[in-house]
Image: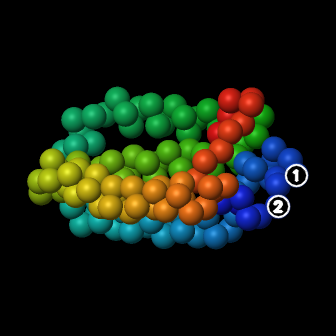
Amino acid sequence: MWLGFGPASESAMQNAEGTPFDATVFGILLAAGIILLIDRRVRTYACIKANWLILTYFAYCLLSVLWSDFPDITFKRWIKAIGDLTMVLVLVTDKDPIAALERLFSRVGFVLMPTSILLIKYFNDLGRGYDPSGYP
């Protein structure tokens, strides 16, 4: 569906659910990040202790599941936000966080730039698009 090969979504609820493949990949990445943070527990604890307000915010977000109109979707989105926090902590708790960030940007750039050029040049429909409504 990301590249436009799949069928158009039939409803907003189907769009909110995602696919089992996406959930599996995300779950594996989240588990790997948590295992790495457990391995780096001293630096992780120090970082979390210094940023306790962020944890307070995430606790409030978890509490908001109770009054949500769609608690299952809200909880799934909270888990995804925990995944974001986990990946940020993986970068911040590295022995050299600046070098880790530089490696991340360079590796992502080595993949995204050639892919973008390839799609724009040879696969126009996938590389460019226009939506009059303004939404991508």
Where disc 2 sits, the SS reads loop
Position of residue 60 relative to residue 104, above or below, is above
Gap between marks 2 and 1, in whole Å?
Answer: 8 Å
Q: Which residue is mark 1?
A: 10
Residue in the picture at 39% in, 46% down:
85
Q: Answer yes or no: is residue 5 visible.
A: yes
Horizontal side, residue 95 vs residue 122: left or right: left
> Tags 2 and 1 in contact by the CB under 8 Å rule?
yes
Image coordinates for residue 23, horizontal then vertical, percent: 61, 64
Horizontal side, residue 38 vs residue 114: left or right: left
Viewer-closest of 97 and 126: 126
Residue in the picture at 56% in, 44% down:
78
Quarter containing the N terminus: bottom right
Position of residue 48 relative to residue 53, above or below, is below
Number of dots carrying numbers: 2
Q: Which residue is mark 2?
A: 7
Horizontal side, residue 19 vs residue 80: left or right: right
